[in-house]
Image (cartoon, grey):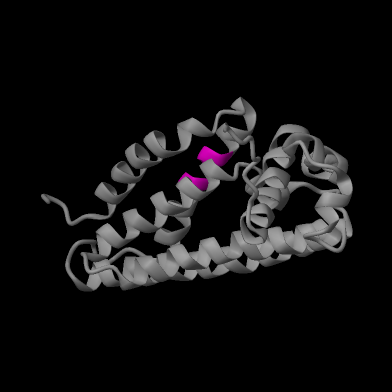
Amino acid sequence: MMTNKRSRKSTGDRKVEILQTALDLAFEAGPGMVSTGMIAQKLGLTQPSIYKHFSSKEDIWIQVANHLTTQIRGNLDRCRAANCSPQDRLKMQVLDHLRLVQKNPALPEIMVLRELHKDQSVLRQQILQSMSAFHAVLVENVAAAQKSGEFREDIDTDDAASLILGIIQSLVLRMLLSRNPAILLPEGERLLALQLAGFAHIGE
């Protein structure tokens, strides 16, 4: 006898699915347009089902903020702990972040949108704090690459970090205009290699 049982997701899995769907919709329709009704429809759920996991729409965006910032800081921790050269840690840091943006392309859109709901402003503030930490780790890695002899010592570490961050920002702008997150990794890897070559000692 055959049974037809629908697989039920655990509470944790369902919450992550709702958060990811909110982010996907933020890229498709714009952060300010996302509603719990849209999330429910996308997932084939009812709105009350959404509220079983989140007390309010504001709670969804707060949890989105925690979800994204945890990933950003987790990538930074992985980079700091990596047993490789400073230059390879730099590459890891940048490419990990581009992978995160590729998976969550609404992230930069939320950061630059002028008109955000109160709940989304909390999200932007947390992301901005995480990106400040991201810049600080870039500076650390540039300084370590100078100390190891991989980069020239006459380069200002903060300027170098800003140039590397500029690669990410320019690619993000291209992504927002083209609506094509797939460009981020291949173009990021290529442009980063060019930039790091400019930091190397002449003749290397």
Q: Which residue is drawn at 34% across and 41% down?
A: 189
Can the viewer see residue 153? no
**121 drawn magenta:** no
Image spot of residue 122 (x, y percent): 78, 64
Residue 128: name its quadrant: bottom right
- Of residues 121 and 164, the one nearer the viewer is 121
Residue situated in front as seen by the camera: 194 or 2:
2
Give left or right: position of 179 versus 141. right
Question: Would you place residue 17 above or below residue 75 in this image?
Answer: above
**Residue sitting at the far top:** 178
Q: Is the magenta stretch mostly helix, strand or loop?
A: helix
Range drawn in magenta: 167-172
- Does 39 sit above or below residue 118? above
Q: Residue furthest front?
A: 1
Of 42 and 147, which appears nearest the observer? 42
Looking at the figure, which quarter contains the N terminus?
A: top right
Which residue is painted at 75% across and 64% down in the image? Answer: 62
State the residue at coordinates (77%, 33%): 29
Observer able to see residue 77 = yes
Q: Residue at x 23, y 62 (%)?
A: 152
Residue 168 in magenta stretch: yes
Q: Where is residue 190 in the image (x, y as percent from the top left)?
A: 33, 37
